[in-house]
Amino acid sequence: MPVRLEPDAPRPNGAAMDELSAIEAATRRLLLALDALDGAVERRREADRDIDRLAAQLHAHDLDRARLAADLDRAAARIQQLEAANREIARRLDTATESIRAIADAQEE
């Protein structure tokens, strides 16, 4: 905030003018530093929001992975059940086929 002189105010002499210029320069530097700080704070807030969004996405991916892992475990268990049932059916078919052959062979004799 620059120092403004009133039109009717007495004009400062050379040393006072140098002081006034130094104060105005320091004020400008301070304002620039404050603007830079505001910019840095806003960038940091945006980075924090980005981190929060990424953390939420990571959490969602973790939930999806856990759900998919559970689905895969259930599917693997179902495959094992179907394979066991398939083996049992094949065993019974073999037994039935042998029985039918034995009956057919007995009738041919």
Image (cartoon, helix red, strand yellow):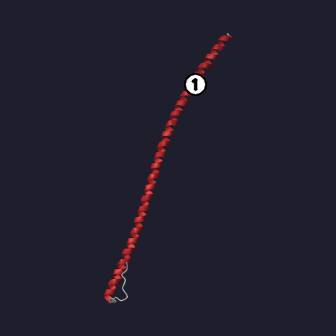
Against 79, is 1 above or below?
below
Left or right, residue 100 beside residue 2: right
Q: Please identify the quarter of the rendering in which residue 42 is found.
A: bottom left
Left or right, residue 71 beside residue 42: right
The front one of 33 and 4 is 4
| In the image, farthest residue toward the right | 108
**Quadrant of the frame with the C terminus:** top right
Q: How crowded is mark 1: few (under 14 residues within 10 Å), some or many (20 or more)?
A: few
The residue sitting at 58% across, 25% down in the picture is: 90
| In the image, farthest residue toward the front | 8
**Quadrant of the frame with the N terminus:** bottom left
Secondary element at image label 1 = helix
| In the image, farthest residue toward the left | 15
| Image location of residue 77, percent across then percent down | 50, 33
Against 55, is 20 above or below?
below
| Image location of residue 6, percent across then percent down | 36, 86
| Image location of residue 92, percent across then percent down | 58, 21
Left or right, residue 33 beside residue 66: left
The residue sitting at 64% across, 13% down in the picture is: 103
The residue pinned by badge 1 equals 89
The residue sitting at 60% across, 22% down in the picture is: 93
Q: Please identify the quarter of the rendering in which residue 7 is found.
A: bottom left
| Image location of residue 54, percent across then percent down | 45, 54
The residue sitting at 56% across, 26% down in the picture is: 87
Q: How many labels, in total?
A: 1
Residue type at mark 1: give it. Answer: Ile
